[in-house]
Amino acid sequence: MGNEPATPKTQSTTIRIERTYPTSAEEVWRLWTTSDGIESWWAPDGFTCEVRKLDLRVGGELVYALTATGPEQVDFMKGAGMPLTTEARKTFTEVLPSQRIAYRSLIDFVPGVDPYQELTVVDLTPSGDSVRVVMTMEPLHDEVWTQRLVMGRENELDNLARVIDRQHTGMKRP
């Protein structure tokens, strides 16, 4: 599987993360757009994910809860004055099965920052027996939170790779 680091970030640039997975675009789409698929990989390490609503259409919503379960993550959430479980909302702006999904995430969980939205676009491109996933994101309100976003998304994509490995090749990633 190919991994490319995120592109450099500034407040005026988008962030791009790319991965290649040894599976079909349809399988990645299923993992990205079903409750059981999302719950199997979406949460960063040290968190669990519970899908509460999934309305996969333009204008529809994905609502899910992330709960800190790992000791470091629990300590971070408490230290930041955040609850251990946060509910997240995404509104779909594009839904092209097995090709592209785009959504606006409501950023309403940062203490002292007014809520705003961030756009993420995910493109799936088949290539032989693999699929290239390109995730493009808007930066968050400052460099610290943008870096947290990138680290979280990179971790999630690594988790997706582990799920695909287990399903298709029986390999386990370290």
Image (cartoon, helix red, strand yellow):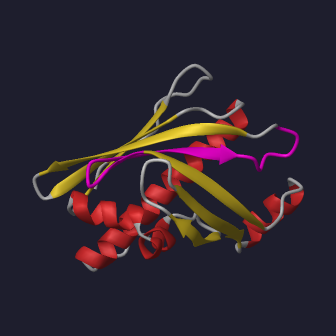
Percent x, y of residue 115: 76, 40
Q: Is residue 107 magenta?
A: yes
Percent x, y of residue 91: 54, 49
Quadrant placement of the C terminus: bottom left
Depth check: give the residue in front, 150 or 30: 30
Residue located 81% across and 60% down the image? 77
Identify the residue at the far left of this view: 128
Tell me where the magenta segment starts and ends, as one range: 94-113
In this view of the protein, can residue 56 be seen by the observer?
yes
Residue located 18% across and 56% down the image? 130
Residue located 43% across and 48% down the image? 58
As drawn, 107 above or below 81:
above
In this view of the protein, can residue 171 be seen by the observer?
no
As drawn, 27 above or below 149:
below
Q: Is residue 170 magenta?
A: no
Total tally of numbered discs in the picture: 0
Percent x, y of residue 37: 42, 71
Depth check: give the residue in front, 62 or 85: 62
As drawn, 165 above or below 78:
below
Residue located 33% across and 77% down the image? 166
Question: Is residue 69 rendered to the left or right of residue 153?
Answer: right
Identify the residue at the far top of this view: 12
